Image (tube, helix red, strand yellow):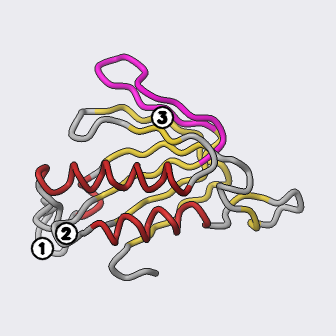
Amino acid sequence: MRALVQRVSEAAVSIEGKKHAAIGQGLLVFLGVESADEKEDAIWLARKISTLRIFDDGMQMMNLSANEIKAQVLVISQFTLHAKTKKGNRPSFIRAANPDHAIPLYEFFIDCLHDNITGSVRSGVFGATMKVSLVNEGPVTIWIDSKTKE
């Protein structure tokens, strides 16, 4: 399971021209589910994101977690995080999970975030064509992969 986490001052997702969800200060999480992912990946990733110390402590040091500032979180499904670009110019998405496997894990990940985050958790719609807007604060963007745990 891969997540691209961005610290934002605001973010929103629109579907078919209508605002579906929006947050203020917090995290925008783009989530890619891989065929090999299991519930343990979602549990680990939700805990990691909720305790990631990437918010300023007032002294311009990234010392606070989302929980410490009661940050809001917006989760967007994004299978393209599993793109393979080694050969040719067209990305391959062979490692991305099919919807039968990905949707339950995506929803389970969101449930895990609800259990781990003190602020609110919102999400897009899996498989929908979405327009995501954000104001990246910092900018701070963190790549997390549950397989490599880097």
Label 3 to label 2, Cα distance in Å? 25 Å
**Furthest-front residue in view?**
115
Residue 110 pos. (x, y %): 40, 49
Identify the secondary structure beneath mark 1.
loop
- Look at the magenta stretch and give its main secondary structure: strand
Residue 43 pos. (x, y %): 41, 66
| Residue pointed to by mark 1 | 87
Q: Quadrant of residue 135?
A: top right
* Marks 1,2: beta carbons within 8 A: yes
Query: How many residues crowd mark 3 within 10 Å: few (<14), some (14–19), many (20+)?
Result: few
Question: Magenta segment, which residues?
Answer: 10-26
Q: Nearer the viewer, mark 1 or mark 2?
A: 2
Identify the secondary structure beneath mark 2.
loop
Q: Residue at x 32, y 25 (%)?
A: 15
| Residue pointed to by mark 2 | 84
Label 1 to label 2, Cα distance in Å? 8 Å
Q: Amino acid at mark 1?
A: Lys
Q: Quadrant of residue 119?
A: top right
Image quadrant in which the N terminus is located: bottom left
Compare marks 3 and 2 and give the one earlier in the sequence. 2
Let me know if residue 25 is in the magenta part.
yes
Q: Amino acid at mark 2?
A: Lys
Q: Amino acid at mark 3?
A: Ser
Let me know if residue 104 is in the magenta part.
no
Compare marks 3 and 1 and give the one earlier in the sequence. 1
Label 3 to label 1, Cα distance in Å? 31 Å
Relative vertical location of residue 93 with respect to residue 16 in this rendering, above or below: below
* Marks 3,1: beta carbons within 8 A: no
Q: Nearer the viewer, residue 29 or 83?
A: 29
Residue 86 pos. (x, y %): 18, 75
> Which disc is residue 7 wearing?
none
| Residue pointed to by mark 3 | 133
